[in-house]
Image: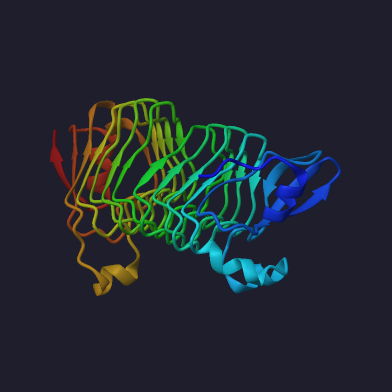
């Protein structure tokens, strides 16, 4: 990567931007480098955002900022360093970048917008600790995305990674909650490794993913509504002794699947230790005809299985 220019004249030759007060929003790139560093300042203006469609080669976003001539190069960009001070990457900022392998995100980042990296070839997603919101489809259809590092404290991440290429998800120590719908429709996902710090798995967190086996670590106390619903490859589940609440439909599947779209393969759910005393929601195993519940005799889990005509074996 070439040395980053710092003169105002040189920066104006390289960047499209808009200003508001003392701040600037990057709206495009005019240069020819494939490994680029976004400036932290343009003249007296501090760069605080990467704008809507700023680096996307999609024709609609190029037209938006009258930079059609520049858009062809966006498919050649391989690496982008976003500077400290940037707090938001707006909608579609890097969507469909066909050569992008890495985007280095700053610790100041708070929001990754809707479809920000959708359909790009980004390989890794290291989300800084300060991020609280990941927009819908932010990393959707990133087929080359293999490594994801997520921090604790994310409040909103609906559909953030759906359709991405990750197969094994290792959630780092320190994360206490997996946000609602964060990994929904991750059909390539086969394995999830959860940390000892985890306490809650959010609503529809892994719905319709390809996960095959789930062993939830000790410390988790609640699994929310439909967390693993329609996981059609799911075969085995082990629940921790710390579990206190498991809500409705968590391991269920839709009737459409039950009537022939894909064979039901869920074989066993083990209620370890005191998890057998957890409050269990309605239709936990909706349309699952072959599952066997393993739980101590007389436990709420065993009674639930017997009441709902689910096969049960004593632990």
Tell me which corner region of the image, top left, top right, bottom left or bottom right, holds residue 276.
Answer: top left
Q: Is residue 100 left or right of residue 59?
A: left
Q: Residue at position x 38%, y 31% from top? A: 172
Location of residue 269 with respect to 76 vertically, above or below: above
Q: Is residue 189 left or right of residue 21?
A: left
Considering depth in this image, is 120 or 247 the residue closer to the camera? Answer: 120
Q: Residue at position x 57%, y 38% from top? A: 131
At which x and y percent is residue 201? Answer: 42, 40
Task: Name the quadrant of the C terminus.
Answer: top left
Considering depth in this image, is 99 or 306 the residue closer to the camera? Answer: 99
At which x and y percent is residue 24? Answer: 76, 46
At which x and y percent is residue 157? Answer: 53, 47
Considering depth in this image, is 183 or 11 the residue closer to the camera? Answer: 11
Location of residue 244 with respect to 100 vertically, above or below: above
Location of residue 130 with respect to 250 vertically, above or below: above
Location of residue 283 with respect to 241 vertically, above or below: below
Visible in this render: residue 15?
no
Q: Residue at position x 46%, y 55% from top? A: 100
Considering depth in this image, is 112 or 20 the residue closer to the camera? Answer: 20
Q: Residue at position x 63%, y 61% from top? A: 53
Colour scheme of this structure image? Answer: rainbow
At which x and y percent is residue 197? Answer: 39, 26
- Count of residue discs: 0
Visible in this render: residue 59?
yes
């Amino acid at each position: 990567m070439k040395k980053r220019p710092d003169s105002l004249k040189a920066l104006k030759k390289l960047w499209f931007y808009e200003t508001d007060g003392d701040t600037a929003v990057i709206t495009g790139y005019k240069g020819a480098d494939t490994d680029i560093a976004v400036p932290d300042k343009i003249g007296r203006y501090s760069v605080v955002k990467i704008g809507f469609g700023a680096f996307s080669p999609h024709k609609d976003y190029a037209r938006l900022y009258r930079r059609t001539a520049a858009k062809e190069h966006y498919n050649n960009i391989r690496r982008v360093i976003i500077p400290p001070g940037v707090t938001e990457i707006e909608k579609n900022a890097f969507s469909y970048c066909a050569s992008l392998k890495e985007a280095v995100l700053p610790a100041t980042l708070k929001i990754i917008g809707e479809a920000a990296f959708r359909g790009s070839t980004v390989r890794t997603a290291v989300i800084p600790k300060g991020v609280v919101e990941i927009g819908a489809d932010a990393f959707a259809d990133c087929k080359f995305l293999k490594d994801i590092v997520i921090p604790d404290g994310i409040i909103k991440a609906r559909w953030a990674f759906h359709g991405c290429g990750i197969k094994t998800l290792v959630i780092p120590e320190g994360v206490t909650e997996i946000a609602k719908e964060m990994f929904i429709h991750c059909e390539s996902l086969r394995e999830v490794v959860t940390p000892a710090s985890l306490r809650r798995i959010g609503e529809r967190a892994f719905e319709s993913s390809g996960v095959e086996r789930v062993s939830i670590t000790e410390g988790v106390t609640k699994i929310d509504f439909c967390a693993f619903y329609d996981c059609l490859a799911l075969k085995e589940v082990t629940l921790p002794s710390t579990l206190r609440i498991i809500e409705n439909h968590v391991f269920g599947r839709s009737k459409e699947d039950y009537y022939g779209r894909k064979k039901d393969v869920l074989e066993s759910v083990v209620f370890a230790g005191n998890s057998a005393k957890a409050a269990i929601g309605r239709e936990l195993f909706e349309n699952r005809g072959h599952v066997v519940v393993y739980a101590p005799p007389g436990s709420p889990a065993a009674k639930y299985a017997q009441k709902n005509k689910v096969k049960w074996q004593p632990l």
